[in-house]
Image (cartoon, rainbow, N blue to C red):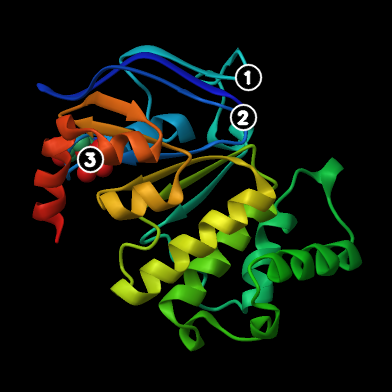
C-alpha cells in the first residue's frame, strides 16, 4: 500500500508541530522518520494512523483519501514503545485478540485462529512462548510478540514508534537486525520512528530526517550516512546518547 502525504500542517494552539510536510512511502517500503525529540515524528505517525487529524493537507492510501477513514478502516498495525501487551492474557491470547475482534462477517473459526497464531509465532520465532504471560517475557520478546499482534490484523500499513526505545543497547541491536530481515520477508508498508541514527540507517530502506516540524532530508541510508551536510544529524545523535 502506497502512502502519500501532501502539505500536511498540524498546530497545537500556537505551536506548529508539522509545517507543510510532503512524503511518499512506496508500497512495501520501510521508511524511518529520524529526528530529535519534538521534531514532529510521532505527530506524523498519529496522522497516518488516524489518531490525529491535520489542519491542512492530505493523506492518501493507494490514491484514495485516508483522512475520511477511521483508525479501524485504515487497517494499520501499531507497535509502540509503551503499547503494552495485555497482562492478564497469555501470549497466544494476546495475538489471537487481533483475530477475534474482526467484524462479524470476517470472523474466524477457533481452528483457523489457532493456525494463524501459530504462523505468527513462527514468524517472530517465539513459538515456544505461546502459553507464557507477558510478565514472564524479556523486553525484547515482548516487543516481538507486540509485532506479531500488530501483524495479526493483516495490516496494510505497519507503524512503529520507538519500538525498541525501552530496551538495552545489546537487545536493540539484535532486534533491529531481526526486524530488517523480517521485513525482507513480509514487505508490509512500514513507518518506523526513531531518534537513533544508527537504528534508522540499519533498519530502513529510506531515511527521512525531520527537524522542527519539517522534513530536512530524504535519502537511502548510505546517502544520509555519507553526506557531510548531515552534520546536524550527528548533533542530535550526540544529544540522544
Ligand atoms: P517527536 O515524536 O519528534 O518527539 P512529537 O510529534 O511527539 O515529536 O511532538 C512534536 C511537538 O508537538 C512537541 O513539541 C510536542 O510537545 C507537541 N505536541 C505533540 N502532541 C501534542 C498535543 N496533543 N498537544 C500539544 N502539543 C503537542
Residue at label 2? 27
Mark 2 surroundings within 10 Å by alpha-carbon count, few (fewer than 14), some (14 through 19), many (20 or more): some
Residue positioned 9% across, 21% down in the render: 14
Mark 1 surroundings within 10 Å by alpha-carbon count, few (fewer than 14), some (14 through 19), many (20 or more): few
Judge: label 3 CB < 8 Å from ligand 1.
yes
**Is label 3 in a helix, a strand or a loop?**
loop
Q: Earlier in the sequence, mark 3 or mark 1?
A: 3
> Mark 1 to mark 2: distance in Å?
9 Å
Give the answer, above or below, for where 217 lies relative to 35.
above
Relative image position of residue 164 (x, y in whole percent): 37, 63
234 and 194: which one is in front?
234
Dot 1 and dot 2 residues touching (CB under 8 Å): yes
Residue positioned 70% across, 52% down in the render: 101
Quadrant holding ligand 1?
A: top left
Question: Viewed as shown, does residue 72 lie left or right of 176?
Answer: right
Q: Name the disc covering residue 35, or none.
A: 3
Q: Name the disc covering residue 183, or none.
A: none
Q: Is residue 13 at all visible to an observer of this figure? A: no
Judge: label 2 CB < 8 Å from ligand 1.
no
Q: Nearer the viewer, mark 3 or mark 1?
A: 3
Question: Viewed as shown, does residue 237 lie left or right of 62?
Answer: left
Dot 3 and dot 1 residues touching (CB under 8 Å): no
**Is label 1 in a helix, a strand or a loop?**
loop
> Mark 3 to mark 1: distance in Å?
27 Å
97 and 75: which one is in front?
75
Q: Name the disc covering residue 62, or none.
A: 1
Place residue 44 in its image quadrant.
top left
Residue positioned 51% across, 80% down in the render: 134
Question: Viewed as shown, does residue 41 lie left or right of 220?
Answer: left
Question: Viewed as shown, does residue 116 lie left or right of 240?
Answer: right
**Is label 2 in a helix, a strand or a loop?**
loop
Q: Quadrant of the C terminus?
A: bottom left
Amino acid at each position: 500500500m502506497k502512502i502519500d502525504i501532501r502539505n500536511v500542517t498540524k498546530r497545537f494552539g500556537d505551536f506548529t508541530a508539522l509545517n507543510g510536510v510532503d512524503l511518499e512511502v512506496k508500497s512495501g517500503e520501510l521508511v524511518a522518520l529520524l529526528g530529535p525529540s519534538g521534531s514532529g515524528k510521532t505527530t506524523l505517525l498519529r496522522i497516518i494512523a488516524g489518531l490525529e487529524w491535520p489542519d491542512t493537507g492530505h493523506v492518501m492510501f493507494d490514491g484514495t483519501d485516508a483522512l475520511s477513514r477511521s483508525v479501524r478502516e485504515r487497517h494499520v498495525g501499531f507497535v509502540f514503545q509503551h503499547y503494552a501487551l495485555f497482562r492478564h492474557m497469555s501470549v497466544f491470547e494476546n495475538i489471537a485478540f487481533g483475530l477475534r475482534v474482526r467484524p462479524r462477517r470476517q470472523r474466524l473459526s477457533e481452528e483457523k485462529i489457532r493456525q494463524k497464531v501459530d504462523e505468527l509465532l513462527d514468524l517472530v520465532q517465539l513459538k515456544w512462548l505461546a502459553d507464557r504471560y507477558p510478565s514472564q517475557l524479556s523486553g525484547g520478546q515482548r516487543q516481538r510478540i507486540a509485532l506479531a499482534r500488530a501483524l495479526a490484523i493483516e495490516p496494510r500499513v505497519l507503524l512503529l514508534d520507538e519500538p525498541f526505545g525501552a530496551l538495552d543497547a545489546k537487545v536493540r541491536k539484535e532486534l533491529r537486525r531481526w526486524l530488517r530481515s523480517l521485513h525482507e520477508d513480509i514487505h508490509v508498508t512500514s513507518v518506523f520512528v526513531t531518534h537513533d541514527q544508527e537504528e534508522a540507517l540499519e533498519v530502513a530502506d529510506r531515511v527521512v530526517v525531520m527537524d522542527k516540524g519539517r522534513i530536512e532530508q530524504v535519502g537511502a541510508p548510505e546517502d544520509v550516512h555519507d553526506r557531510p551536510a548531515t552534520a546536524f544529524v550527528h548533533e542530535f545523535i550526540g544529544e540522544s546518547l
